[in-house]
Amino acid sequence: MREVHTLNSKSAAVKKRLDYPVIDADAHVLECEWALMDYVRDIGGPKIAAKFEQTGRPGYTSSHRSMFWAAPSGKYTIDRATCMLPKLYAERLEDAGIDFAIVYTTYGISANQVRDDEMRQVLARSLNTLYAEMFDEVKDRMTPSAVVPTWTPEEAISELEYCVNTLGLKTVTISGEVRDAVPEVAAVDPKLGELTQRVTSICMEPRDGNDYDPFWQRLIDLKVLPAGHSGAQKTQRRQSPNCYSFNRLGTFSVGNEFFARSLFFSGVLKRFPQLNVAFLEGGVAWASQLYNDLMEIFEKRNLDWIYEHQDPSKLDIELMEEMFDRYGHMSYMTKEKWRACQELPQSQINETRPMNDFEAAGVTTREEIRDQFVPNFYYGAEADDKMTALAFNEKMNHFGVKLKAIFSSDIGHWDVPDMSGVLHEAWEMVEHGTITEDDFRLFVFENTAEMHTKMNPDFYKGTVVEDAVTKLMAGRQKTSASAAE
């Protein structure tokens, strides 16, 4: 009988020195496609099953080089089997130095963008039913995340309620955007429309005037954290037909940044301050840049500033004419040319759109940007991502904040052929001095514990980390109460 454990792994050695558990915020399952096919047939019926067999796996096209040779093989074959078999997965978590893992879809990332409404919804329901049954016997060590398509708020709410109320799942994977056909093209020729793409946010000016506020509220009601887990794959700047690495680099950070930016500017954060959101697989460097960019653009684009310093009606016309008269040395840079262009001053242009870019967000100070952006956003960062250190660099982030990076192994995908190495790889940031041991504790335990428990105090109930999480949150509540006094 073959040995399935990696004895004395470097990650297990790191784990032994910690006095707290390690929670993996983003491991992956490798779905058995033949098993998924059975669920598609049961849920969608023979017609959908036949269509599914004919069209094949979502996201694979000749015009766009998708992920290939993406699962462990060779001497790491055991890791491939591990990610397909939850009981083996749970047994081998110790090799990776992990106590508890939240497991995300592989197949569903593409399935969430299937344009056929019926096929997309059948795939989501099939995947979620499969996950609920696959992981039922290992609930103390792992929990799967449901796939919830968000093409309409009604679709999203329907699958969310089924996942929570019927299947008993506790967290969901969503896409912050919809990629449909350009409607003007599709109206003329549907087949031609399928060759086009329109990307719209589900927060910022969503398509067809859809209102997703009932969906955000339902997430809160059901105590479910949504995890954005889609990138910019198959968008125009990532459509090399030959080079997967070209298409892959930066894709999740771009998709996450678009989603986070949309949540902020649309006012979702203002209207739903109880909502926690995770952004997975893109690291945290993009979030640090977005956070700091928001601070800096607000300084020069807040309403008071632009009325004081950019209002066209305040332009000193006489000074402009004098400068053109003295320094305009070409025929088209004369005072007369300048005067002629002022026949329609900019101040008379009828601007009907909002002047205040931050109105929907309800932001009037930089402190309010911090108070919306920092508390409820969490960022999945992989073990080998050195830029994770930016999250903990208080000198780099305005107001000296730490962003909430969460340890995300990505076990199951091509970049983690050996699961026994991930925790040690993350620990190297401590060894190299880019983060502290206290930061490491936040990264691999506290932030992930908090992001789910704030939404659902019972999220970790019945798991091997329940006691540690309960103690952590009780300690934080006590500290907050003392500070309030």
Image (cartoon, helix red, strand yellow):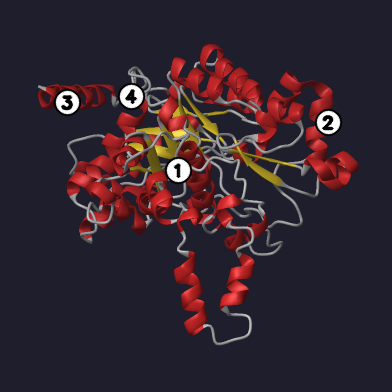
Q: Mark 1 Cα within 10 Å, few/some/many (few <14, many 20+)? A: few
The residue under label 4 is 453
**Type of the residue with mark 1:** Arg
> Marks 3 and 2: which is nearer the front?
3
Report the side of 199 relative to 266 (left or right).
right
Q: Secondary structure at mark 2?
A: helix
The residue under label 1 is 2
The residue under label 2 is 50
**Can residue 34 be spotted in the picture?**
yes
Report the side of 215 relative to 451 (left or right).
right
Q: Earlier in the sequence, mark 3 or mark 2?
A: 2
Q: Earlier in the sequence, mark 1 or mark 4?
A: 1
Residue 404 picture quarter: top left
Which of the pair 106/180 is nearer the observer? 180
**Type of the residue with mark 3:** Ser
Marks 1/4: CA–CA distance? 39 Å
